[in-house]
Image (cartoon, helix red, strand yellow):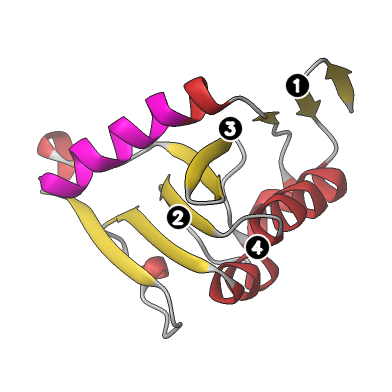
Amino acid sequence: MIRKGNIKVYFKNTSILRAIVRQIRSADKIRACVAWVTNPKILSALEEVDSELILTRHKCNKWKRAIKVKFLGSGRGRKKVLMHHKFAVGFRNGEPAFVISGSYNWTKSAAKHYENITVIEDADIAQGFYEEFKRLKKL
């Protein structure tokens, strides 16, 4: 892990998973746009807080959990449109407080890949990501 001020960067997959779960559990609520979510540890952490996700429309995202979900994406082949973001905004005391973002897919298989996440503890940056979440939620 690399740390500078209010920014932490993770490259080791076991550290990434622990960091995501820890950040989720530190929040009052989570609003996230993540292409795919299948990791049971992440899903369980999301169920512990007020969570709302925007996911890409894909068969792997069809699970039964107490999490609000909106699906985006359509088409097949060359006309396919994916919601490919990978970010989560964490709220504390009702306000955006941090962002988790990076290449890491929130899936079981991500542990086999070379991935990264960045955790930014900054209200202004978190607000910017939350604005994107709200924009996509309206679609």
- Tell me which numbered mark, 2 or 4, is placed earlier along the sequence: 2
**Residue type, numbered disc 4:** Lys
> From this viewpoint, which residue is outermost toward the front?
93
Which residue position is annotated with label 2? Answer: 36
> What's drawn in magenta, residue-wise?
127-139
Residue 74: x percent and y percent? 13, 50
Q: Of the numbered discs in the image, which one, if any, rests on residue 56?
A: none
Crowding around mark 1 (Cα neighbors within 10 Å: few <14, some 14 to 19, many 20+) is: few
Whole-number angstrom distance, CA of label 2 to CA of label 3: 12 Å
Q: Earlier in the sequence, mark 1 or mark 2?
A: 1
Camera-nearest label, 1 or 3: 1
* Tag 3–tag 4 contact (CB < 8 Å): no
Report the disc number at residue 108: 4
Where does the image place residue 86, in percent across and percent down from the top left?
48, 39
Report which quarter residue 131 is drawn in. top left
Judging by the rendered image, the residue that carries numbered circle 3 is 103
Residue at left offset 30%, top offset 32%: 132
Q: Which residue is mark 1?
A: 6
Give the prevailing secondary structure in the magenta stretch.
helix
Residue 95 lies left or right of residue 53; in this view the side is right
Counting residues from the start of the chain, the first of labels 1 and 3 encountered is 1
Secondary element type, mark 2: loop
Of the numbered discs 2 and 3, the one sitting upstream in the chain is 2
Q: Position of residue 113 (x, y in %)?
A: 71, 41
